[in-house]
Image: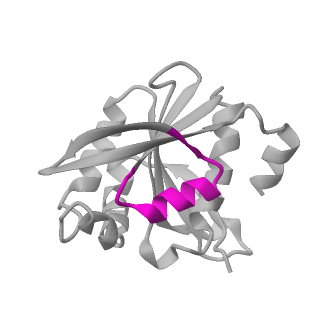
Amino acid sequence: MTPIISLAPLNAEDHAAALQAVYQATPRFWEMYGLPTAPAGQAARDLDEVAQTTGRYLLGIIRRIDPANAQAGGELIGLADFRLHWPEERTAYLGMLMVAERYQRQGVGLQAWRLLAPWLAETAGIQTVRLGVEQFNPGALLFFQKAGFTLTGGSNRISVGSKRVRLLYMEQSLKQSSPANMHSTSK
């Protein structure tokens, strides 16, 4: 059964420790970059960077502890990191959609995207969402295809630590969704 989730903005003061725990709960992600685990303090650095970058947001994926009681609180189990109106107006760049390994392959990531996409379109005025998937991460490529993204044919090599990584660019148009469809996916 897919956990019931919500999205909530994260900040360094209140959420650095919980976000670092999510990073620690995703060892396969860090192993792809040749790291044994998430670097110490990575969450605090990321949250500080988000706070200093105009239009950039880091939302936590919160699993409701008691599905029948929205007031019961929740557990941070993932994140969505994105930047609005970048690299151009009416475009968002999704830098990361991460779910703790314990909750992967349960529909959490797709549910998070279905909550985020209508907000991007309706509230932020975004028409296109772009992202880059590491060429060596076929699971992420399949996930984003399932979420409605398509490969653009573009790619780029970037440096991540001591490693050179090829990103395959994908995008999704949000303006094709009808308001009825967008609302039904966010329930």
Most foreground residue, 126 or 4 = 126
Furthest residue in direction right, as rendered? 180
Residues rendered magenta in the picture: 134-152
Pick the quarter of the image with the N terminus.
bottom right
Quadrant in the picture for residue 168: top left
Report whether 68 appears left or right of 26. Answer: right
Position of 17 relative to 114 (above/below): below
Q: Position of residue 140 (x, y in %)?
A: 47, 60
Position of 125 relative to 69 (above/below): above
Q: How is the image coloured?
A: one colour
Name the residue at 55% across, 60% down.
143
Pick the quarter of the image with the C terminus.
bottom right
Name the residue at 25% across, 40% down.
158
Quadrant in the picture for residue 107: bottom right
Q: Position of residue 2 (x, y in %)?
A: 66, 75
For residue 159, say whether it is visible: yes
Position of 43 relative to 178 (above/below): below
Most foreground residue, 83 or 14 = 83
Q: Position of residue 6 (x, y in %)?
A: 62, 58
Q: Position of residue 51 (x, y in %)?
A: 35, 35
Most foreground residue, 153 or 107 = 153
Q: Is residue 135 magenta?
A: yes
Position of 42 relative to 52 (above/below): below
Report whether 175 appears left or right of 128. Answer: right
For residue 78, say whether it is visible: no
Report whether 55 appears left or right of 22. Answer: right
Name the residue at 44% across, 24% down.
87
Furthest residue in direction front, as rendered? 153
Q: Is residue 85 magenta?
A: no
Name the residue at 23% across, 64% down.
38
